[in-house]
Amino acid sequence: MDFERENFDLSGPLHLTCVQWDNAHHRMSVAASLVQAVYILERDRQEKRKDQNALAPPWWAFFHFQLLRPLVDDVDSSIFGAIFEFKPPLSPRNDTLYRSPRYVIAFRGTLTKQHSVTRDIELDIHFIQQGLHQTSRSTIALNAVRNMVATVGDSNVWLAGHSLGSAMALLTGKTLAQTGTFVESFLFNPPFVSAPIERIKDERVKHGIRFAGSVITAGLTLAMKAKQQQQQPPPQQQLQQGKQPQQQKDLCVASFDALAAWVPGLFVNPSDHICSEYIGYFEHRRKMEEIGAGFIERLATQNSLGGLVMSAFGKESEALHLIPSASMTVNVMPARDFREAHGIHQWWQPDLRLERKLYKYK
């Protein structure tokens, strides 16, 4: 079964013989295929498949990409990402090439194989604890993307990732966006740290739980702000200490606002409890605005309960799943099981039923 799923001729998007780069489905399919290529690069390494026996190359060569270099974890030497360079043929002429990337940096998710599972699960735990940004793998990823963007410009680079890999791409994209650098991003089944409220069928119950959560989060946020202001020395004392008076501006809010212009692509499946809460996250924000509770939700949407608790104990955290804007694509086709709902393979199927919605933070 693994061989079939890894073999491009058996599982790949063979129908995409001519990619139209202005077609959203084509762009999604290519990005997902390059993420799959990273999974198989690591599996080729583990199984010692080389040269003609390697299964990864067709996943990028079919779309005229070349492997520039893999990204290797410094802890277990596993391949967790790769940089691909687009080398289109000179003919036939494709009028949509202006929408194509020059480089794609892709990250795989967790591999449940003995050679990599320990390190991957360790990073999954770091994500849940909102500490993925403190890991060496994230540093390697961020440096690779920064160097590429500095060399060719942000408009020539795509980020792509699946599951844990989408969290890595999200962390990298958010970090760059805070400095005004916006990279087009394809985040497949990105994890959202929350109870799977979206799976509740009763809309009233679902909204009630989210409303209560927003009120609690907003209340704790205001309490934390008040505590921080009380702990700050008065302006006159700051001047006596040779310091400029601190501005009473919430840096968290400023950071969140700075991200609003970055609109990553989220690709989620309602049957995947790992990522489905993104649907509720954005829809609840819209509903809160409609009922006149936008102020509460603007506070709540920028903070997580876990992050607030950690801040209260003086611990640093980064809630990656909290983002202002997104272009969300939802696969509404029924999934047979969780593996199918969470899998990368669904995103290049030709007969998908997709719903797309743009959420812009105001």
Image: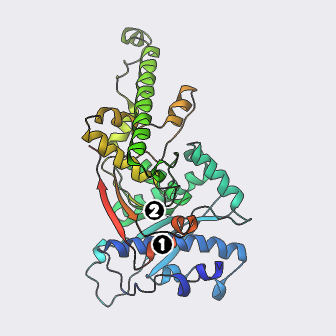
Residue 324 placement, left or right of 171? left
Q: Residues within 10 Å of mark 2 (few under 14, many from 20)?
A: many
User: Residue shown at 44%/68% (left/top)?
Assistant: 104
Q: Is residue 344 visible?
A: yes
Point out which mark residue 269 bears.
2
Label 1, secondary structure: give it. Answer: helix
Q: Relative to residue 305, is residue 25 depicted above or below? A: below
**Label 1 amino acid?**
Gln
**In which quadrant of the rendered image does the N terminus lie?**
bottom right
Q: Position of residue 328 (x, y in %)?
A: 36, 59
Write the residue at 36% across / 52% down: 181
State whether residue 115 is above or below residue 197: below
Extreme residue toward the right, this view: 114
Q: CA distance from mark 2 to mark 1?
A: 9 Å
The residue where tag 1 is placed is 346
| SS category of the residue bearing label 2 | loop
Q: Is residue 102 visible?
A: no
Type of amino acid under label 2: Asn
- For the point 40% across and 74% down, which residue is it? 352
Q: Outermost residue, bottom direction? A: 92
The x and y percentages for residue 26 are 36, 76
| 316, above or below 144, in the image | above
For marks 2 and 1, the one nearer the N-term is 2
Instruction: State yes or no: discs 2 and 1 in contact (Cβ < 8 Å).
Output: yes
